[in-house]
Amino acid sequence: MAQWRTSFGDRARYWFDSTLARGAYALVGWMALVCLAIVVPASAVLVWTDPGAPTSPTGRLAQVWHLTGETLRLGGATGTPLRVTMSVLLALVALLYVSTVVGLITTALTERLTALRRGRSTVLEKGHAVVLGWSEQVFTVVSELVAANANQRRGAVVVLADRDKTAMEEALSTKVGPVGRTRLICRSGPTTDPAVLTLAGPATAGVVLVLPHDEPDADAEVVKTLLALRAALATEGAGPPVVAAVRDDRYRLAARLAAGPDGVVLESDTVTARLIVQAARRPGLSLVHRELLDFAGDEFYLVNASALAGRPFGDALLCCPTSSVVGIVRGDTPLLNPPPQTAMAPDDLLIVVSRDDDTACLHDCAELVETAAMATGPSTPARPERVLLLGWNRRAPLVVEQLRRRARPGSAVDVVANAGEATKRQVSEADAHGGSDLTLTLHHGDIARPETLRRLDVHSYDSVIVLGQDPAPGQPPGDPDNRTLVTLLLLRQLEEATGRELPVVTELIDDRNRALAPIGPGADVIISGKLIGLLMAQISQNRHLAAVFEELFSADGAAVHLRPATDYVLPGRETSFATVVAAARHRGECAIGYRSHDDTSTSPGYGVRINPPKAERRHWTVEDEVVVVGHDCSGQDCSA
């Protein structure tokens, strides 16, 4: 019996499903039957329990029909069959009309809401920042733009990318966090379509930033986006300034031509390689760059210096109590760390590191200098350096080139990588381009295997550079860091086994993996995407800073250095920072801060202090370092 019941239930469900599969007519029929099955018995109960209902069965049935018609909006008229039929017909026509109108309104509203959800409406903001493209850099760029707009009443950032609008909003909300008074607007569509670009309102924007995505054809996509932007602005006249980034130098000229005369194009791989080498030569330098490039602390500004016209540049170094002077802009040309005797012109602008553009006030601080506390001996002598390069990627030849540019005689670079044919060819080409000051040697080995690192005397090297692996086509962005994290874990094991710290500089592809890396919070980590994002955000606020950063990160210009504090002040003495600035001026450098090794673990900047007041006094030790902007003296006395 139970088997029969189960079979009957299965057949009933199958028959019901088959009936519904016939379409909308079957569904309407079932709904009508269900309604009648509920409404008719309920109406009969109401009539038969009503004391005022007709006593005759015919009258009661007519009353049941009347209640049923009112409930189902079928008229409920009684009388002859023709009258009842016409009443039902009119009710059905009214029902069909109302249902159709409601359906049309619902469909129109749904389509409009769907279009709004997809981000297809045109932005009507003015003076806003437009970010074109989507990659890991977008979170850094938007965060910095939000910080830059913190003192503005109606700041806005528009992000246009070929992604779902809701997904972009959720990702930005999670990664960026509160945006304060800045409006964050997302629009969806391909950035290479001029018609879609107009949705972001580029004609009325204050700046447009073009981000490269994470695919191998990113540079070609950037050039195409710049061409589409030019086409979209063709009828609007002069457009806003453009800041873009490419990875390969081969695309930089094309991107510059597409960006126009006012556009700025950064080459991310070259900048990343330069900073890796600078951090390898002086551990802790990446922390300084991080402090200088974000909007959270002190950054670069251009201020009027007409009051200093006719005076030597050296005087300007001690004329800003709460800002650090690093150079001048003459015309459109930045002069970082010019000779102290350079005469200031009336139209020159001072390049300063300051909390804000309105904090760079002029006031002579020369009285704070204590000449007796200044060091007078020669600089700390330089020696040949040995660098261990673990891994190989598309930036590795640029890293070797940067190491070779400032190599001292007798220096050596040992490369450990899976030496495929392409790697061997690139290493051979890099070795052929150099002179005799640097020896380049390739060792075959897997850097993610313990036996490979154990064969190397890693503690005999002055610095160890761990390069991230290039993402393969279609590979998730975070995967290339997997081997890097394994290598760092093995290096950490060697440190614990020997009790000696390794000077490691790590390149990571994905900023999210920094928290997973087995390194100290103050270690040197170069994340190319975040670095370029910081640079783009800085330049978007002041286009003239592009030339400043170009020289600052070039191989031959003035750069940021960490020098021993004993080169500037006598150890064990307490003196003002103005004394350090004066000592750096004597050596032909611009002091902008220091790094203390007393308690780097609890310091917010891990011991790095950028732009301290000139009047700040501290006890200087032999472990302290001074942050200066100057040229590489290769161990010679910079004052010579």
Image: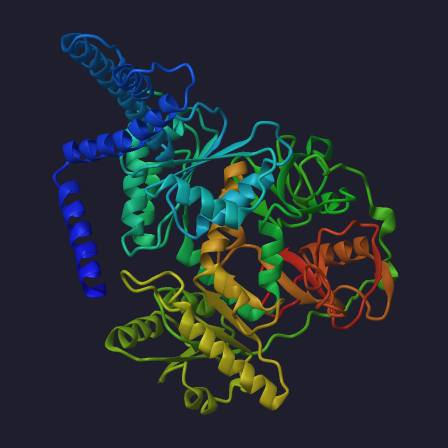
Residue 35 spot, x, y in % from top left = 28, 30
71 is higher (above) or lower (below) than 283: above
Q: Residue placed at 50% from the left, 63% from the top?
A: 526
- Residue found at the far front of this picture: 55
Q: Can you say which quadrant of the picture contains the N terminus?
A: bottom left
Q: Residue 95 falls in which quadrant of the image?
A: top left
Q: Residue placed at 31% from the left, 16% from the top?
A: 63
Q: Residue 153 falls in which quadrant of the image?
A: top right
| Residue 230 in sight | no
Q: Choose between 524 and 398: the one closer to the eye.
A: 524
Residue 73 spot, x, y in % from top left = 30, 17
305 is higher (above) or lower (below) than 286: above
148 is higher (above) or lower (below) than 10: above
Residue 383 spot, x, y in % from top left = 58, 78
Residue 44 spot, x, y in % from top left = 33, 25
Q: In this view, does 525 lie to the left or right of 95?
A: right
Q: Residue 248 falls in which quadrant of the image?
A: bottom left
Looking at the rendered structure, the number of numbered marks drawn on it comes to: 0
Q: Choose between 74 and 161: the one closer to the eye.
A: 74
Q: Is residue 53 left or right of residue 339?
A: left
189 is higher (above) or lower (below) than 49: below
The colour scheme applied to this rendered structure is rainbow
Q: Is residue 545 left or right of residue 605?
A: left
Q: Can you say which quadrant of the picture contains the C terminus?
A: bottom right
Q: Residue placed at 55% from the left, 44% from the top?
A: 144
| Residue 602 in sight | yes
Q: Residue placed at 22% from the left, 18% from the top?
A: 96
Q: Choose between 591 and 27: the one closer to the eye.
A: 27
Q: Is residue 505 left or right of residue 572?
A: left
Q: Choose between 99 and 143: the one closer to the eye.
A: 99
